[in-house]
Image (cartoon, rainbow, N blue to C red):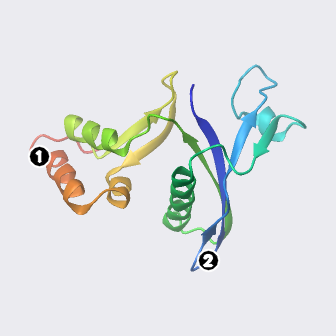
Amino acid sequence: MGGVEVECGVLGNEKPIASLPGEIVSHGFDGADWYDYSAKYAEGGMNLVVPPRLEQGTIERVQDLAVQAFVAGEVEGMARVDFFVRPDDDVSRARELMQQHKVQRILVCDDQKKPVGVISLQDLAKSEDEREVGETVQKVKEEGAAVH
């Protein structure tokens, strides 16, 4: 699977701040070439490259999303938020799929079709302008739309 797996620490309570993300380079001892249990916990199972080999705008977006996840989860103290950044990621594609299938949430799957996350209308509201979100909500809520 093409992409970069990163983690980003968040620290705080009322005003959380994100750390500089780190790129996870897994060595996959148990046969998997991804960040599995052995890569995370076994000695030498992974390297953390700081800063990650991403464009500055992408790094800032990861930091912003990490803080948003921290706040949305009502977390206090500290947390680590993991991401998988792919070169062809585009929020507008999620919006198109929601409108087309009239759903409020869509699964995000890897290249092997395994679920790795969920994108909701609320997620779109945080990343798009009001007009685009309004159009998406209107199309999703049209008569006959599935509520998930």
At 32% from the left and 38% from the top, the residue drawn is 93
According to the image, label 2 marks what residue? 13
Q: Position of residue 66 (x, y in %)?
A: 56, 58
Q: Position of residue 143 (x, y in %)?
A: 9, 44
Image marks 1 and 2: residues in contact by CB distance under 8 Å: no
Q: Position of residue 74 (x, y in %)?
A: 54, 69
Q: Which quadrant, please, contains the N terminus? A: top right
Q: Which quadrant, please, contains the C terminus? A: top left
Residue at the extreme front: 55
Give the side of residue 94 with respect to residue 89, left or right.
left
At 38% from the left and 54% from the top, the residue drawn is 123
Q: Nearer the viewer, mark 1 or mark 2?
A: 2
Q: Is residue 128 above or below residue 30?
A: below
Label 1 element class: loop
According to the image, label 1 marks what residue? 142
Work out how far the residue at label 1 is from the one at label 2, CA to CA, in angstroms: 39 Å
Inspect the image, locate mark 1, and give the three-letter code of the amino acid beneath it: Glu
Pointer 1 or 2: first along the chain = 2
Q: Quadrant of residue 49?
A: top right
Crowd tier of the residue under label 2, counting other residues whose Cα lies within 10 Å: few below 14, some 14–19, many 20 or above? some
Give the side of residue 38 with respect to residue 33, left or right.
right
Label 2 element class: loop
At 49% from the left and 35% from the top, the residue drawn is 87
Q: Who is closer to the viewer here, 74 or 91?
A: 91
Q: Who is closer to the viewer here, 41 or 21?
A: 21
Inspect the image, locate mark 2, and give the three-letter code of the amino acid beneath it: Asn
Crowd tier of the residue under label 1, counting other residues whose Cα lies within 10 Å: few below 14, some 14–19, many 20 or above? few
Q: Position of residue 15 (x, y in %)?
A: 57, 78
The number of numbered discs placed on residues in the rendered structure image is 2
